[in-house]
């Protein structure tokens, strides 16, 4: 069961939703179904290091690696 990321085109809310079958997805904030499916990034953990699939390596700075949070 995949988790998808969406953005509501009416209120701007961004959210994730675990989808099962042909489930209809609605915005949890406003209840509307006019949604844009977003591209999700993923990461891989090997041993004690985490490597993001794209973007900067750390959510708290723009570095591609960070000793303080273990991003390699």
Image (tube, rainbow, N blue to C red):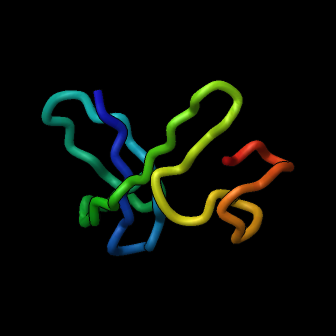
Q: Position of residue 53 (x, y in %)?
A: 46, 52
| Residue sitting nearer the eye, 37 or 52 | 52
How many numbered marks appear?
0
Q: Position of residue 32 (x, y in %)?
A: 31, 61
- Determine the residue positioned at 28% across, 63% down: 35
Q: Taking 62 as reference, is 14 above or below it?
A: above
- Determine the residue positioned at 47% across, 59% down: 54
Q: Residue furthest left?
A: 22
Residue 20 placement, left or right of 5 = left
- Determine the residue positioned at 57% across, 32% down: 45
Quarter of the N terminus within the rendering:
top left
Q: Position of residue 29 (x, y in %)?
A: 48, 58
Q: Residue furthest right?
A: 68
- Determine the residue positioned at 28% across, 60% down: 37
Residue 34 placement, left or right of 5 = left
| Residue sitting nearer the eye, 28 or 61 | 61
Q: Quadrant of residue 30?
A: bottom left
Q: Taking 10 as reference, is 52 above or below it?
A: above
Q: Quadrant of residue 8?
A: bottom left
Residue 71 placement, left or right of 44 = right
Q: Position of residue 3 (x, y in %)?
A: 36, 38
């Amino acid at each position: 069961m995949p988790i998808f990321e969406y953005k509501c085109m009416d209120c701007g809310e961004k959210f994730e939703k675990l989808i099962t079958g042909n489930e209809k997805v609605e915005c949890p904030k406003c209840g509307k179904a006019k949604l844009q499916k977003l591209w999700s990034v993923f990461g891989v953990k090997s041993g004690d290091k985490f490597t993001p699939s794209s973007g900067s390596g750390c959510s708290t700075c723009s570095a591609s690696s960070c000793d303080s949070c273990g991003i390699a």
